[in-house]
């Protein structure tokens, strides 16, 4: 553990294992796997729940405003689906059967 000032006036807390940074706290920002966190929580790596199908991301009262992702994978004991964004439509793939479905989207009338 290293606590000290860098070339700025703010103190940084570094927790390292070997040459790699495990955790940094700097300017009210936390970095996991990165020396320079760019936002409140900046993670360089994968994030996993501790156990399967146990934890929520958000709640009915505290929801995420936007989610930015590549393909969206949905899998549980009943189904296994992937939603893929194509250029002009969304495609839903049943990963159990390999069947693909185009989502039919109807434009709304603009005011």
Image (cartoon, rainbow, N blue to C red):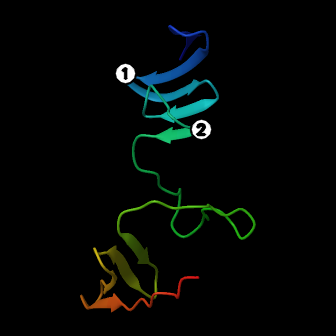
Q: Which residue is mark 2?
A: 40
- The numbered disc on residue 82 is none
Q: Is 51 above or below relative to 27? A: below
Residue neighbourhood size for the residue with mark 1, other residues' Cα within 10 Å, grouped as few (<14), some (14–19), many (≥20): few
Residue drawn 42% across and 86% down? 79
Q: Quadrant of the C terminus?
A: bottom right
Please provide percent x and percent y for residue 98.
24, 88
Residue drawn 57% across and 33% down? 30
Hey, which residue is sitting farthest front in the picture? 111
93 or 18: which is nearer to us? 93
Q: Is residue 21 left or right of residue 13?
A: left
Q: Which residue is mark 1?
A: 18
Q: Is 84 above or below relative to 3? A: below
- For marks 1 and 2, give the CA distance: 25 Å
Please provide percent x and percent y for residue 26.
58, 23
Residue neighbourhood size for the residue with mark 2, other residues' Cα within 10 Å, grouped as few (<14), some (14–19), many (≥20): few
């Amino acid at each position: 553990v290293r606590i000290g000032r860098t070339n700025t006036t703010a103190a940084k807390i570094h927790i390292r294992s070997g040459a790699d940074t495990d955790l940094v706290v700097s300017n009210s920002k936390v970095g996991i796997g990165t020396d320079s966190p760019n936002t409140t929580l900046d993670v360089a790596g994968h994030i996993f729940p501790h156990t399967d199908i146990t934890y929520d991301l958000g709640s009915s009262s505290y929801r995420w405003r936007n989610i930015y992702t590549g393909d969206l994978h949905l899998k549980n004991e009943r189904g296994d689906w992937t939603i893929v964004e194509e250029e002009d439509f969304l495609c839903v793939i049943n990963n159990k059967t390999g069947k693909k479905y185009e989502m039919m989207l109807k434009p709304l009338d603009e005011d």
